[in-house]
Every structure is written in structure tokens, then in C-alpha cells.
Amino acid sequence: MAWTWFHRLGSPPFVYRLATRLTPWFAWPAAILIVAALYGGLVLAPPDYQQGQGFRIIYVHAPSAWMSLMVYVTMAAASAVGLIWRMKVAHAVAASCAPVGASFTLAALTTGMLWGRPMWGTYWEWDPRLTSELVLLFLYLGYLGLRASFDDVQRADRVSAVLAVVGVVNVPIIHYSVVWWNSLHQAPSVMKLGTPTIATAMLVPLLLMLAGFTLFFGAILMLRLRAEVLRRERGTNWIREALSS
Amino acid sequence: MNVSALELAPAGEAMSALGAARLVLARDLRLAFRKPEQVVQPLAFFAIVTTLFPLAITPELSRLREIAPGVLWVAALLASLLALEFLFRDDAHDGTLEQYALSGQSLTWLLFAKTTAHWILTGVPLALIAPLAGAALGAPSQTLPLIILPIAVGSLALSLIGAIGAALTLGVKRGGVLLSVLTLPLAVPTLIFGARATELAIRGMSFAAPLELLGAIAVLGLTLAPVAAATAVRISLE
Amino acid sequence: MLRGVTLAVRGGEVLQITGANGAGKTSLLRTLCGLMYPEEGHVSWRGHDVREDLPAFHEALVYIGHEPPLKADLTACENLRYWVGLRHRVAPQRVASTLESVGVPGLADRLVRTLSAGQRRRVALAALLLLAVPLWLLDEPTTNLDAEGQRLVTSLIEQQASTGGIVVAAVHHELSIGAHRLRRLELTTA
């Protein structure tokens, strides 16, 4: 039974229809959760005893960083499926993930810098997690650049799929090495962009925001996947039928 | 011409995977011997880049000594990137890579042999001249021989990581910059551990810990990189 | 992109593939090798899909593309020993005698960069003899050869077929092989 599902997922028309139907199921809960999380984080949660109001940016920073990683893993998993089972749709999923993941990474970096300014006095302090995020951004940019350099879609798919799989293996190694590097040169007064002592009132909005971001990613993925499938399958009969109905 | 007199029977016993790998290694070494620019150009680049830093910063040896490990490693990294152009480019152009894929031997093994040859021709010479650059940057003379080991191990890791990028960018016109963009983030751990090992070596302290971490990366690369590179090469031949 | 190609070749037969430039002769050959992957359909060798054991399939074939895969900075002998040597050891004396039989005696120790295009093509033909595999996939094997060289190619193909081997060759002109052996496939553009 699961195998038939898997085969159906390999069919572009099926995926196109599925993505169209699923989008509102992702989008509306995402909107609700994000609004609730914003209210909980900006209004309800008490100010941090150490950082005052400035810490509230964590409600956007931490989920963004988490998503940037999760999207990369999704991209790599889709790439692996596409490579092993030669599924074009899996490659379309990977292609749809990449710009979204890069955007999350940029958001994490920007919010991190905005957070750092009041805390450190400068926008950048080579904090280990921000540095890791920066390298992750380079990995995303490399992936997008590699995709763009092939005219043939199939070649672009398969080559960038190998890169995604290689990258996902490297991400933990890179992160560990950056943390190791930072610990060697730790100035004692530097405050890490770490989670402050978590009280429940702080934790709940954070988790809500994370769930909201995940659903938001789902919605965006569905939209991009539809566009990606349209682009790849243009000129085929089922597209003409689907668009004229 | 009496073609019918030609025997069509095979001449000798079948070649093992290891034998084929040795053959590929020997071939690459012999080719480099005939065209030494593959060896000389990256070394020259390394020497020039290390010269640029004192020119750009300061001639004071005491200050240079502080940044010497970083300079050596960045220069070695950039020189290795340059040298990666020689890994697959010629073989892809003249159809040799295609014949490797069609030889019935494991492409992974053959590419492993090619990457090893590449390291012998670029990484090892780089490691051997690094002490000279270190001396020019103020490293104390008794620590100079110690500089060789981290760069030798690290350049092996770089050859392996770079082989993946080189295989991925086969067929991309002027793919040199893209190769760098792909390889440099993956090379960050090698850079971090290698520079730290070199720094401790220059300071006369034990550098076993970062060297072991560097070795771990090289070992991981030895097992995984040729597989990834072979996959990418096969895709480029499709 | 190729569509609707179905073929079967038996031992002792020569398949001649013709078609205009861009019709897909090279793509077909590369798909038969297993280098390219058919989206639909399959390639079988001796009753089994080649994808089940590609290395074993590759051991049974040799593919020579448009350009002979020779390295300019190695001698003809070195090129052949490294090429054929991936499959089985080959002694230098045998290389020398094979080069003689394909009409380029004494070139064994000449660097390939000093050879003419026709001489390089003959060195590649020597590889066919040294490799001694049942299946030959040749892309325009008579390129750069004079009339005598083309007769050499024809006789090599005849020889391979008469010993039970198979030759698949993409050509521009008809091969002058005996009609009982020759099968034809013409690729047309839609």
C-alpha cells in the first residue's frame, strides 16, 4: 500500500493536484500559529532580566535558524530520493526548497546581527552559531549556483542532488569545527546568542513560532512546487488540460 | 595486409581492481613528469600569495609570526583550488574519463587513485615548501620541520574534498570560480583544524589533538569522496 | 532525444547506424554502452538487463567515440598499455606487433602529439585488437582514414563478426560488409 503511494508521488500531475489541495491546509494554520506566537512573544512573555526587551528577537531568530537547517535536510532527503529512484518530482522538491532555505538562513543572520548590536555593541562578533549559519548560507548559494550553471534540467537536478547529499553530511562537521574554533579564542565577556533561561511563558511562544514557521515552509513549498512542476512539464498534455479546466 | 593472422585472444590475465588503480596512479605520475607545470604552477602561486601578506600588512617578523599559520593555510587552500583544475579536466576532454567509466573496473577505485596521484603531485610538494614560507613569516627555525605534517595531511583532505567539487563542475564552462565557491565551505573544518595544528607547532606546543581531528577528516574523505566523485562523473557522462 | 528505437543484434552480425548529423547516432551508442540511461525501455546483453551488472557488461565491450581517447603526452605504446591494461596485462612486444598490423609500425615510442589524425585513429584500432572483447561500439570509425585505412576498418569488422563478435557502428557511408552479416538502422529526425 505504501509503495503505491510512493509511485503516485512520482507522477507530476498527481503531485500538482496534491500540492494545490494541500496549500490552504498549511497556510491557514501557519498564519494562526505565527500570529499567536507573536502575541505570546511580544506581548505576553515577560522581559528577560538580563537583556530587557531586546531578547524578543529570539522569537524570529531561533525558528529561522532551525528552519534553515531543517530545509537543508529536506532538500538533501529529496535529492537522495531523486538520485536513487530517479524521480523527477523529488528533484523538483529539492529545487523548490533551496531558495526558501537560503531565505531562512538570511533571516537568521539578519536577526542575529540585529540582536547582537545591543548585546555586543557590534553587528558581528564571530559568534559560533552565526558563523555556522554564514557557512550554511554559502552552501546554499553554492547549490543554487551549481543548479544555475546547467542548461539541461536533468543534469542540473542530478549534479546538485549529489552536492546536497555531500553538503548534509558536512553540515554537522562544519558546525562542530566552528564551535571548537570559537572555544579556543573565547573572550570571557562575550555573550553568546544563546537561549536565555527559559521560563514557560517564553518557551511556549517559541515553540508555537517554530510550528508556525514549519507550516509556513510547507505552504511555500507547495506553492513553489506547483510552479516548478508547471515549468518543467510545460507543453505536456496534462498541463494544457489542467490549466484550461 | 593479413588481418586474419591476428590473434584476437586476450594477452594476459585479468587485471584486479588494485592493479587497475595502480596503473591509473602510475599514468598520472608519468604524465606529470612530462608536463611539470601541473606541479610547478600551484607551488609558484603558493609562494606568491604568502609574499603578498607581508607586503600588505607589515614586514615585522614578530607580528607576522602571529598570523603565519593562517597565512600558510589560506595560501595552501587557494593553491590547492588552483591545482584542482588539473585533476579531471584533461581526462574529461580527451575521453579518458569515459574509458575509465567503461573499463569494467570500479570507477570509485580509479578516481581514488587519481586523487592520490593529485595529492602526491600537489599536496606533498606544498607541504615540503611550506617550512620555507613559514621561515619567511617568522616561524622559529626549530619548529619549521613540524609545519610539514599538518599541511601534508590537510592537503590530502583538500584533494579529496576538491575532487568532489571538480567532478560536480565537469562540463561547466569556466567553472573555476564555481568550484571554489563549492569547495571552500566544505573545506572549513580542514582549515580550522589545520591552522590550529600549525599554530601550536610554531609555538612549540603539542599539536596532536587538532592533527588527529584533521586526520579524521582525511579518513572520512578517503571513504566518501571517491564515491561522490564517481557518481558526479557518471552524471557528467550521461 | 531518441524515441521508438527497438533493435536486436546476434553474434556474428554488424549493425550499421546511419542518420543525419544530430539524429542521435552518438546518443544511441552511448545508451547502448550504459553511459546514458533510457527513461523508458532497457538494454539487454545476453538475456539480462545490463543495469543488473554494469561492470560485467562493460568488460564485454569497447566503445570508441568520435575522438580516439589517447593522451597527447604519452607514447602510442604507453597509451595502449594503460588503456588495455585496465582490463588485462599487455606486453610491450604485443603492442608493437599489433601496431604493425594496423599499418603504423615503428610508432610505438612516438608521443601521440606528434602523430597525425589518421595515425591516432589507427592506434585506436590497435586497441580494438588488443582488447579482444565480443562487442564493439564504434562512432564513425573511418574518420580521418585514407582509402587503405577504411579497408582496414572493414576487414577488422569482418574479422570480429566472423569470430562471433558483434559490431555496432555509427557511420556516414555504407559499410562494405557482406549482406548476410549486415543489419541496418536509419535514424530520422521527426
Image: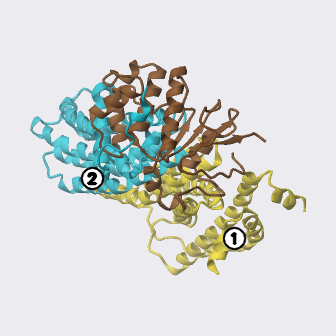
Chain colours: A yellow, B cyan, C brown
- The residue to which callout 2 is attached is B214
Q: Report whether A191 appears left or right of B194.
A: right
Front residue (pair A59, C163): C163
Asked whether the viewer can see residue B173, the reply is yes
Q: Position of residue A174 (x, y in %)?
A: 39, 56
Q: How many marks?
A: 2
The vertical placement of B7 against C118, above or below, is below
Query: What chain does mark 2 sit on?
Result: B
Crowd around label 1: few <14 · some 14–19 · many ≥20 (10 Å):
few
Q: Is residue C189 above or below residue A93?
A: above
Which residue is found at the position 53% from the left and 71% from the top? Answer: A47
Look at the numbered disc 2 and give the secondary structure of its residue.
helix
Amino acid, disc 2: Leu
List x then y, in percent, for residue A149: 59, 41
- Badge 2: few (under 14), some or many (20 or more) residues near its Cα, within 10 Å? many
Label 1 amino acid? Arg
**Disc 1 designates what residue?**
A8
Identity of the residue drawn at 70% across and 38% down: C23
Please identify the residue farthest to the left as the structure is shown. B142
Question: Picture coordinates of residue B180 (x, y %)?
Answer: 45, 40
Answer whether residue A120 is visible to the viewer in this image: no
- State which chain disc 1 sits on: A
Q: Are marks 2 and 1 on the same chain?
A: no
- The residue lying at 51 percent from left, 55 percent from top is A164
Front residue of this view, candidates C40 and A153 = C40
Coordinates of residue B128 in the picture (x, y in percent): 20, 35
Quadrant position of the N terminus of chain B in the picture: top left
- In the image, is residue B188 above or below residue A51? above
Q: Quadrant of residue B27?
A: top left
Q: Residue at x 48, y 38 (%)?
A: C159
